[in-house]
C-alpha cells in the first residue's frame, strides 16, 4: 500500500507515542506488586543446572508460579519453562543424579511431593499422605526424604491426626482451651498441633505412610514461624536426622534455648547435641565426607539478636570448637565448600549482606562479594551461586568465582518491567552519632531529581530494633517508593542495628529511647548538611514495629522535628505491651526482666508517659492479626490524639498481621501514607 502524507504523519505520531510510552516513570506501588518474584531454587550436585520457581502476574492480575530450568554449563543459555500447571510449585530439589527434580504442589487438593524428569513427560506424584507436606529434604543418596507435617503430638499415626483435625473443624463450640504459653504466635492462635518430622524411603511406589521421628514431642520442628528446612539435615550416611528445636516445656514463651537434636531415621532415642549451650543453636550443616557438622550458636540466653558464632563439631571425636571467634559479624547461613574444610557464609556487613569464605582450620575470613543483599543458593566446585538484591534491583541469580572474581548474572526476570521504572540514585553516608561513634545510613534522591531543587524528606526508621534499612529491595517497606513519589529518602542504622559488630547491636538493649534517638537526630542533620537538596525542615518520619515505637517516642521527646509522623504497628504503652505480646523473651531481654522485675526501665522508655508533649500530626496503622504488637497499642495512641485534638488518622486491617502482605492492602497502605505525608509537607 502506498503511504500517503496522512498515513506517514499518523505513523510518525504513532512512533512518537510509542517512544513516549517507553519512557520510564518514577517507581510506584502498582509496579512493585506486579514485579516477577523468584521463589525456591536448587542447583544440581554437579553444578551444571539451576531450577527455580518464578511467580508472575498475567494481564488480569492473576498470579501463577512455575518452574524454570537454566543450563549453567552453556554460556548465554536461556531459561526453559518446565511446568505450566495451575497453582504453585515450591520447595524444589534436584535428585542426586541431576536428571529430575522434586517439588511440592497441591494439584489434587492436598500439598504433596512430585517428581519431574528433565527430559520430558508429566510430573509423577511421589507422596499421597493423609495430611499436607509443608516442606521436605532429600538424603545425600536420594533414597530417603524427611518431611515436615503438622500433626497432634499425642497421635500415633497420620490418620489419627487427620481425624482430630476433622473433629475440630466440625466442633460446634468455638472456645480455645490452654494451660500454658504460647497460646498464640505471630498471627495464629495455637490449635495444639505441632510441626513434626517424618522420614520415608523413596522407591517406585507412591508413599502413603512415613515414620514420625519426633513422635510425642510437644515442640515445633522446624521452629515457627520463619524457619525452614535449613534447620533439618540428614547425616551424610543417611542413618540419622539432625534438627534444631526447643525442648518440650512450659517455658516456650520466654526462652530462646533452641538445641540441635539427633534421632535415627527409624525413630527412637533423641539425643541433644548442644545441651551445654542454653542459648540458640541453629542450622546443622554437614561436610560431604561426614566428618564435620557446622552450625550457628548464640551465647546469651533469652537474646534473639545475639551474635551467631560458627561452631564446628568433629563427628568422630565429638570435639566442638568455635571458628573465627574474633570475627565480629553474625552469619545468617552457612554451606561447606567442595574441599569439606572451607565454609561459605552470608552475614550483614555495613549496610550490605555479604558473602564470606571462612577457613575452618585457622579461622581466616575473606570477603567474596559485598555489594547489596545476597543469599547463598549453592557452592559448586569453583563458584558460589546466590540471589542478589539491591535498592534498585528486585532479585536475580548470580555466580562469582570462589576467589571473588568473575561476577556473572544468570537471570534477568524483570528486565522488561524494570525498563519502565525510574529509580532514584542512592548512596551510603556516615556521620558521628552517639558517643561520637561512626554511624551509617543511606540517602535516595527523588526519581525525578532536578539539580538546584530542594525536596521534602521521608525519614524511614527500621524495626527490630536489631535490624537494618540497608542496600536491599523489599516487597513491603520499599524506600524507592518514596523516591518515586518525589521525596528525598533518609535511612539511618542507629545504635542497635545489625551488621556493625555485636557491641553496636547490643547497645540498644536497656536504652530504647536513648542512643537511637540521638543517632536519628544527628543523622538527619548530617544528611541535610551533606546533601543540600534535602529539605530537613520539611520532613515526615515513619516506621514500623520498633520504628513505630520510635514515632511514639519522637512525639514525646522530639516534638518539633517533623511535619508529620506515620506509626505502623508501634508500641505505645510498655506495661500493657509486656503482658499481651507472645514472645516474652524479647521484652525481658530488652528491658532487663519482666515488667514486675524491671518496672522502672519499662516506664523510663514508655511513650505513654510523655503524652503531654505530643502535638505532631500522626497516622496510625495496625493489623488486627498482629500478635507481636497487638492492635490495642495503635488504638491507644490514636484514642489519645483524638481526645486531645491532635490531627490524627487510623487505618486498621482486620486480615493483616505485623506486616502488610495482601497486594491490594499494600496499595491502599501506600496511597494513605503518601497522601498523609503530602498533606503536611506541601508548602
Image (cartoon, grey):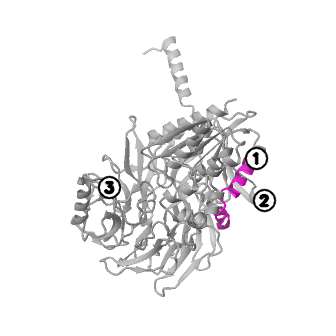
Is residue 366 visible from the viewing direction of this image?
yes
Rendered location of residue 586, percent (x, y): 54, 63
Tell me the tag on residue 436. 2
Distance from Cα at disc 2 to Cα at disc 3:
55 Å
Q: Quadrant of residue 59?
A: top left
User: In the orientation shown, which residue stands out farthest toward the bottom?
Assistant: 317
The circle drawn on residue 525 is 1
Q: Nearer the viewer, residue 359 or 534?
A: 534
Q: Nearer the viewer, mark 2 or mark 3?
A: 3
User: Quadrant of the image for the N terminus?
Assistant: top left
Residue 503 colored in magenta in the image: yes
Give the mark nearer the N terminus: 2 vs 1. Answer: 2
Determine whether the residue tagged by mark 3 lies in a helix, strand or loop. Answer: loop
Sequence order check, earlier mark of 2 and 3: 3
Q: Residues within 10 Å of mark 3 (few under 14, many from 20)?
A: few
Please give the name of the residue rendered at 59% of the width and 49% of the height, measured from the top-left corner: 548
The reply to whether the magenta stretch includes residue 260 is: no
For label 3, the residue is: 175
Q: Is residue 405 above or below residue 459?
A: below
Residue at disc 2, secondary structure: helix
Whether residue 401 is visible, yes or no, is no
Q: Position of residue 457 (x, y in %)?
A: 68, 40
Callouts 2 and 1 close, C-beta under 8 Å? no
* Label 2 environment density (alpha carbons within 10 Å; few <14, some 14–19, many ≥20): few
Residue nearer the viewer, 599 or 340: 599
Q: Do callouts 1 and 3 mark residues in contact (Cβ within 8 Å)?
A: no
Over which residues does the magenta segment extend? 498-527
Drawn side of residue 176 relative to residue 25, left or right: left
Task: Estimate the x, y position of residue 158 in percent, counting from the top left.
Answer: 25, 66
Q: Which of the pair 548/238 is nearer the observer?
A: 548
Q: Residue at x 72, y 47 (%)?
A: 524
Amino acid at each position: 500500500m502506498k503511504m500517503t502524507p496522512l498515513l506517514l504523519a499518523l505513523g510518525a505520531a504513532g512512533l512518537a507515542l510509542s517512544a513516549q510510552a517507553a519512557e520510564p516513570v518514577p517507581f510506584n506501588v502498582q509496579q512493585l506488586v506486579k514485579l516477577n518474584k523468584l521463589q525456591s531454587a536448587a542447583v544440581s550436585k554437579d553444578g551444571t543446572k539451576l531450577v527455580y520457581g518464578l511467580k508472575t502476574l498475567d494481564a488480569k492480575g492473576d498470579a501463577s508460579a512455575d518452574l524454570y530450568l537454566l543450563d549453567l554449563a552453556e554460556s548465554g543459555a536461556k531459561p526453559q519453562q518446565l511446568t505450566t500447571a495451575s497453582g504453585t510449585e515450591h520447595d524444589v530439589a534436584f535428585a542426586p543424579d541431576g536428571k529430575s527434580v522434586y517439588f511440592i504442589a497441591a494439584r489434587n487438593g492436598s500439598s504433596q511431593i512430585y517428581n519431574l524428569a528433565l527430559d520430558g513427560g508429566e510430573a509423577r506424584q511421589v507422596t499421597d499422605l493423609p495430611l499436607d507436606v509443608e516442606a521436605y529434604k532429600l538424603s545425600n543418596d536420594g533414597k530417603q526424604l524427611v518431611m515436615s507435617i503438622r500433626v497432634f503430638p499425642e497421635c500415633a499415626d497420620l490418620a489419627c491426626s487427620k481425624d482430630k483435625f476433622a473433629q475440630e473443624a466440625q466442633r460446634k463450640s468455638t472456645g480455645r482451651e490452654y494451660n500454658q504459653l504460647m497460646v498464640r504466635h505471630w498471627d495464629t492462635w495455637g490449635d495444639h498441633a505441632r510441626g513434626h518430622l517424618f522420614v520415608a524411603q523413596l522407591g517406585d511406589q507412591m508413599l502413603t505412610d512415613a515414620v514420625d521421628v519426633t513422635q510425642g514431642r510437644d515442640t515445633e520442628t522446624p521452629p515457627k514461624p520463619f524457619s525452614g528446612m535449613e534447620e533439618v539435615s540428614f547425616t551424610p550416611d543417611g542413618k540419622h536426622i539432625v534438627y534444631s528445636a526447643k525442648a518440650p516445656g512450659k517455658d516456650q514463651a520466654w526462652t530462646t534455648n533452641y538445641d540441635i537434636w539427633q534421632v535415627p531415621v527409624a525413630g527412637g532415642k533423641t539425643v541433644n547435641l548442644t545441651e551445654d549451650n542454653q542459648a540458640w543453636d541453629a542450622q546443622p550443616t554437614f561436610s560431604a565426607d561426614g566428618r564435620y557438622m557446622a552450625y550457628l550458636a548464640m551465647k546469651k540466653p533469652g537474646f534473639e539478636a545475639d551474635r551467631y558464632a560458627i561452631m564446628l563439631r568433629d563427628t568422630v571425636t565429638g570435639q566442638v570448637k568455635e571458628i573465627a571467634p574474633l570475627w565480629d559479624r553474625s552469619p545468617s547461613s552457612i554451606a561447606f565448600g567442595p574441599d569439606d574444610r572451607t565454609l561459605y557464609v552470608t552475614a550483614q556487613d555495613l549496610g550490605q549482606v555479604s558473602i564470606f569464605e571462612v577457613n575452618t582450620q585457622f579461622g581466616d575470613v575473606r570477603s567474596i562479594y559485598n555489594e547489596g543483599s545476597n543469599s547463598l543458593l549453592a557452592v559448586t566446585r569453583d563458584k558460589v551461586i546466590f540471589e542478589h538484591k539491591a535498592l534498585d534491583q528486585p532479585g536475580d541469580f548470580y555466580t562469582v568465582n570462589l576467589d571473588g572474581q568473575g561476577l556473572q548474572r544468570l537471570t534477568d526476570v524483570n528486565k522488561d518491567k524494570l525498563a519502565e521504572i525510574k529509580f532514584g540514585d542512592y548512596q551510603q553516608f556516615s556521620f558521628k552519632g552517639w558517643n561520637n561513634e561512626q554511624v551509617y545510613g543511606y540517602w535516595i534522591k527523588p526519581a525525578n531529581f532536578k539539580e538546584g531543587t530542594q525536596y521534602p524528606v521521608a525519614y524511614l526508621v527500621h524495626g527490630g530494633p536489631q535490624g537494618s534499612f540497608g542496600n536491599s529491595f523489599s516487597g513491603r517497606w520499599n524506600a524507592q517508593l518514596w523516591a518515586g513519589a518525589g521525596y528525598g529518602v533518609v535511612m539511618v542504622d542507629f545504635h542497635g542495628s545489625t551488621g556493625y559488630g555485636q557491641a553496636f547491636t547490643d547497645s540498644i538493649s536497656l536504652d530504647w529511647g536513648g542512643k537511637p534517638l540521638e543517632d536519628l537526630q544527628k543523622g538527619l542533620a548530617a544528611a541535610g548538611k551533606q546533601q543540600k537538596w534535602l529539605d530537613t525542615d520539611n520532613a515526615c518520619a515513619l516506621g514500623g514495629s520498633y520504628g513505630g515505637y520510635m514515632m511514639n517516642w519522637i512525639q514525646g521527646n522530639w516534638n518539633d522535628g517533623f511535619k508529620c509522623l506515620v506509626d505502623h504497628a508501634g508500641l505505645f504503652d510498655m506495661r500493657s505491651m509486656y503482658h499481651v505480646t507472645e514472645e516474652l523473651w524479647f521484652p525481658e531481654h530488652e528491658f532487663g526482666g519482666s515488667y514486675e522485675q524491671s518496672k522502672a526501665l519499662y516506664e523510663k522508655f514508655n511513650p505513654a508517659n510523655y503524652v503531654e508533649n505530643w502535638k505532631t500530626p500522626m497516622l496510625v496503622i495496625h493489623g488486627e492479626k498482629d500478635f507481636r504488637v497487638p492492635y490495642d497499642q495503635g488504638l491507644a495512641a490514636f484514642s489519645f490524639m483524638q481526645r486531645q485534638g491532635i490531627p490524627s488518622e487510623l487505618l486498621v486491617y482486620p486480615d493483616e498481621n505485623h506486616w502488610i502482605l495482601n497486594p491490594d492492602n499494600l496499595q491502599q497502605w501506600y496511597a494513605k501514607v503518601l497522601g498523609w505525608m503530602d498533606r503536611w509537607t506541601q508548602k
